[in-house]
Image (cartoon, rainbow, N blue to C red):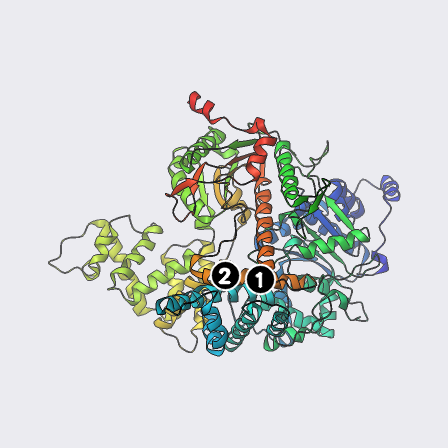
Amino acid sequence: MSDSKFTAAAPLQSLHSELSERSPVLTLREKILAIRNSLRPGQQQMADWQSGPLAISAVPGAGKSTGMAAAAAIAIARQYERSSHRRHLVVVTFTRSAAANIKAKIRKFLRDDLSLPQMGFFVYTLHGLALNIANRHSDLSGLQLENVTLITPTQSHRFIRTAVEQWIANNSGIYLRLLEGHQFDGEETERLRRQSVLRTEVLPELANTVIHEAKSSGISPELLREWSKQTTDEYPILSVAAGLYEQYQNLMRSRDFIDYDDMILAALRVLENDSARRIEQNQVFAVFEDEAQDSSPLQTQLLEILASDGGDEGDHYSLNPDAMNIDAMNIDAMNIDAMNRVSTADSCTDAIHRVSPHSSLNLVRVGDPNQAINSTFTPADPIYFRQFCEECDRIKRLATMDQAGRSTRIIIEAANFALKWINNQWLATTNNGQKTPVNRQLPFRLQTIRPVEVGDPQTNANPAPVGRGLELYTPRDIHHTLELLSQRVIELFGEDPTQNSAAVLVRENRQGRWLAEALTPVCKEHNIILYDVGERDRRSHVPQEILALLQFCDRPHSPDYLKAALEALVQRQLIPTQDLNALASLPEEFLYPGPLAESQTETVQKAARLCRSLLRARLELPLYQLISFLALTLNYDQAELATADKLAERVNQQIAGNSSMGGMLSALSEIVSSERFEPVETEDSEERYTRRGQLTIITMHKAKGLDWDYVFLPFLHENLIPGRFWVPPQSQFLGDFTLSEVARAQIRAALHGESTIPDVTQAWEQAKHLKISEEYRLLYVAMTRAKRLVWMSAAQKAPFTWSKPENLQEQAPCPVFPALKRQFPECVVNLGAMTKQA
């Protein structure tokens, strides 16, 4: 922290002269210097960190995780060298797979390069860190893990639905105003239709959006109501949202449920206590944050408190009150049991700790605002990291990692061009020919990717391109796209598929499903492994399959339940594929054939025996053991078994005191239909996605942080990238906007310190710009996943919606695509010439 022995950096010249007089056995300082010298300039600035705040803005492929791991190992080594009081380093990142990756790299540096014990640090996700703090001080956090259930609700979750119904019952006047919409003739059928739309779509979506936005920022329902008074909406949207939010909080408290935002709030309640805060701060000498562009306000606040120097005297941590719209230390105001007491200050421009050259904030934040791709469906907002970068730049504590060795040069040139071209579209030309910003913020930070210098330590940095490195196709339709993509995949994998990695990046999971079905026979013929992440990675099949088997055990004579159970068994390859409709049509005859029944084939007998064993287990085993038994029966692998155990624990906890098959089925049905059940991962998920000899089908969002030799980007159409805000026809009676997006934009405007909260029209426009910006950043992320070839296509005909891929119509390409074709004409593939050659 601010220990004087730990702040001064050793001059490199004196260090070099000292090293020259040393013995052949390397000292710890020599080993540190060796690691430091193996890094690029931007990474070296991270490795040179000794204390205070530091912002690192990194381009794609710059080696953020490697640089952070090296800097972390060096910081830990310096602690060994200079401090008798052992504090540890906290490293925080966005996902569990990224946490596992960084942890392995830090351990490798400590073991192989520094010959030190692999300790002195912890790697967490943000929510994992919060839960750890809250669990250590459960009396302060109010979080009793043995008594609460963690959920990840969607808008169809029963708590959201119940909150909507309770709000309607308590606010009939506002509800009737929503029913009237812009125009209403009183016709009964239309009234019933609007009621259904409001209850099942509009209000649940508004509740789900605002609850996440508000809780992640420490905003109470009361504060939302105050903000609503500043608006002139024809519907009091923020007031409606506040009511829904309040009902949801009451339901969560009454049932002992928590969500991920509650973990952050619980940790902040702990850190409000002087004694607990000193205990936590005195165990930590610094905090390193990766993927900082994905932080929310409360997550940022948590890290800053932890990274502040508590000091031996336990100085009280404080934020500049003018920098916060929330009294940062009045965490009781954000207590789950008292969410209606959040105070405000004058400005909410930024939620970051004001840094200075002598700041006691030992925080290193690494990120790339140009890879912020989560803010339109999570509370993450890159504005906070941008502000931290600006603060650090002001005191010369901003470093830029702009050299990237991942991609071949033509891919770097294409990505840089796309960034500048998109930003240029955001500028309006004035009468004198000058460009001025149309909106408050450009989609991209002006940051150019540069190839690495000669002698870079990375092996095969900026590799030679394969083919043209960038290939641009304009197929006739999506079937022609598939043909061209398949042909190129076969060519690239060649005779030895194990030498290369490739991925098809799609914008929607529905595109991935369509491609996976079409590519399966091609990959099978050419010995290429096809991995469809959307189908297999989520492990959502675990609760679904367990539910199917339990429903069969509960009602074995139901043809529908029997068929669903048989489908699960076929999917797991436990019984042969056969005509399941014939088996399910007469359940009793299939399960217990009489002496006069037609003899069953061996495949049918095998299926019947397995089904009977399930029914026998239902009679013989205690209810709490059924899920684990079914998981073993389904021959689950290690990760699936762990996920099933987690599911069993969750269900048994939920039905405690009312243990019955009906209760278990109800709890499971709720999880399957309205919740994102988080799987348990037992292996390096990144390796699963990037194995050699494998063609991975993955969404652009999921691909962030990964890379492949060859990346395919098909279906680049304007209706998806950048897309457009679309008001569903059934809810257009409310106006040409959606309540949820207007509320999100109004909340963010208030949080960002804008002088006034925008009205509905302005908020809708801001929401559009946010969406367009993020979609373009998503394309930028997708392009920069490729090492040696990026294959891009925009078919002339494509579906308007991928729920109906057979309905083809003319589709305009993503606007960047024609611009790339004009800028890189040598990369445009002549399909006419290809046809003649064929």
Say which of 135 and 174 sits in front. 174
Given residues 38 and 115, the one toward you in this image is: 38
Coordinates of residue 558 in the picture (x, y in percent): 25, 63
Residue 319 in view in this figure: no
Q: Residue at x 62, y 39 (%)?
A: 418
Question: Hey, which quadrant is residue 225 in on the image?
Answer: bottom right
The crowding category of the residue bearing disc 2, from other C-alpha atoms within 10 Å (few below 14, some 14 to 19, many at least 20), is: few
Identify the residue at the far top of this view: 837
How many circles with numbers are drawn on the protein?
Answer: 2
Q: Nearer the viewer, residue 292 or 561?
A: 292
**Residue at the left extreme, as displayed:** 596
* Spatial CA span between label 1 and label 2: 10 Å
User: Left or right: 295 with respect to 483?
Assistant: right
**Which numbered circle lies on residue 735?**
2
Q: Is disc 2 placed on a helix, strand or loop?
A: loop
Q: Can residue 578 be seen in this view?
A: yes
Q: Marks 1 and 2: CB-CB under 8 Å?
A: yes
**Residue 203 at x, y = what percent?**
48, 67
Would you say 695 lies left or right of 307 here?
left
Number of residues whose C-alpha sits closer than 10 Å to that of mark 1, classed few (under 14), some (14–19) or many (20 or more) = many
Dot 1 falls on a residue whose secondary structure is: helix
Quadrant into which the N terminus falls: bottom right
Disc 1 marks a residue whose amino acid type is: Val
The picture places residue 295, in percent across and down from the top left corner, at 64, 58
Q: What residue type is labelled 2?
A: Gly
Please tell me which residue is depicted at 57% across the width and 71% down the height of the picture: 239
Quadrant, the C terminus: top left
Q: Which of marks 1 and 2 is nearer the N terminus?
A: 2
**Image location (x, y in percent) of residue 376:** 57, 55
Which residue was labeled with disc 1? 760
